[in-house]
Image: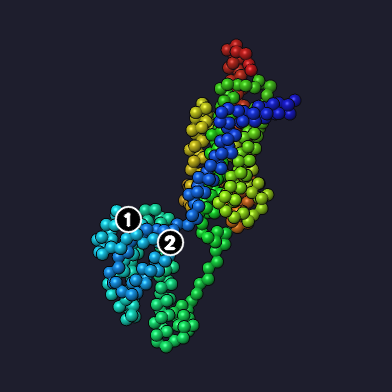
Amino acid sequence: MRWRQFWEIFTSELRGLFRGRVPLACLLIGTPLGFTLLFGVIYGANIVNDIPLIIYDEDQSALSRRVIQAYTDADRFTVTEHVQSEEEMRAALLDNCGKAALEIPRDFAKDVKQGRSAEALLIVNSANNMFGNAAIAASQEIARSLEISVATGMLESGGLLPAAALTNAYPVRLGVRITGDPANGYAAFMLGGLMLNGLQIGIMVTLAPLLITELLCPRYARRYPSWIFMLAGILPYALVAFVGYLIALFACIHLFYVPMHGSWLAVFALGGAFIAFVCCVLLVFSACVPSRELSLQAPMLYIMPGLLYSGLSWPAFDMGTYAAAFGALLPMTYAGDALRDIMLSGYAPDLARNVTIMLAAAVGCFLVAWGVFHWRRMRGFRRAAAQGEVAP
């Protein structure tokens, strides 16, 4: 009996997902895929290059021209303008003719030749800190290379052989090896989390009205248990969402070349637990709100901050107490970083813990939603009976 009731509700909801001019299944599958394509195109360049650079060379020496050439040759910068005064340089920055400016002072080469410290100035407009961080990092690399080159040349002119001159000019060498995301690319860093954010938004706009719709316009009689309706009702959404999750993940890997070093079993477990958590927490909203409109609006206050508080872009360990506490309530907190670790590093150390937390939260939310929904549903049946209405 229970199995037949479950199957009846399940097939009805599944058919409902594929009805209409724009079926809800298209939103469930299309939203995560759309987020992946939309942001994948934005992050297609992977790193910030061609930062517009203004040059003010007050020294006009061979060494200053060598410095300028180093910036010109760097992929990170594109020289857009040469100015003749400091006032002109600052005006050009204010007019947004460049995002950075390089000022080389008078006597720059003379100071270097006489063994005194010479200082060029890089001015960076960091209103968008992606430009600021990239410009500063690239400038430090250029300055280090120039320092070594100039110091080596001076030592060679004093009679040292090239190898000995290089050792004296650069006695301490730091080797760097970057794992996970060697190219420091934004696509690998952000795309998986943005795809998950699109997935939870797709689930929200399709699943959120499920329980309140049944409360306002009952389709199933009292003999259908509330938990059967809830379980059979969310299962089609979860299955179609899982398909959308896999399609979007394949787009990340094969269209935007995000590496996949980890286990697909881990990816399946993480995605399934994430979808279960999102679905069940949306049932709580759906069971508590008074209207279909609020069932879509109220969860936005919970879902939309997920990307900011998840630790995906700003590390969770550096968040304040209240921000970390709010982040601990969000599905994205347990899925975003873990998915990135699986894909880029091949292993997510907190995978088992995160999957367990999400599944436990899903069960807890399901029970809360069931309690509220069952109480409101029975009260509706009693009210209908008292008014002499025929129960469905």
Height in image: 158 above or below 4? below
Q: Earlier in the sequence, mark 1 or mark 2?
A: 2
User: Which x, y percent locates residue 119?
Assistant: 33, 71
Q: Nearer the viewer, residue 122 or 171?
A: 122
Dot 1: what SS? loop
> Residue under circle 1?
97
Q: Is residue 227 above or below residue 160?
A: above
Number of numbered discs: 2
Of all residues, the one furthest to the bottom in this rendering is 159
From the top left corner, tell me how far across and down residue 331 is, in percent. 56, 43
Please state, as top left, top right, bottom left or bottom right, where the N terminus lies in the image: top right
Give how far apart the Cα atoms at labels 1 and 2 are. Answer: 16 Å
Q: Residue at 63% across / 16% down in the picture?
A: 391
Q: Is residue 177 visible?
A: yes
Q: Amino acid at mark 1?
A: Cys
Please identify the residue farthest to the top as the structure is shown: 388
Above or below, 377 against 116 in this view is above
Name the one closer to the observer, 198 or 208.
Answer: 198
- For the question of whether residue 133 can be seen, the reply is no
Which amino acid, by three-letter code, is at mark 2?
Arg
Q: Quadrant of residue 216?
A: top right
For the point 34% across and 78% down, which residue is it? 112
Graded by Cα atoms within 10 Å as few (under 14), some (14 to 19) or many (20 or more), the crowding at tag 2 reads many
- Residue 234, percent from left and from top: 63, 33
Front residue of 280 and 176: 176
SS for callout 2 = loop
Q: Which mark is residue 76?
A: 2
Q: Residue at x 32, y 54 (%)?
A: 96
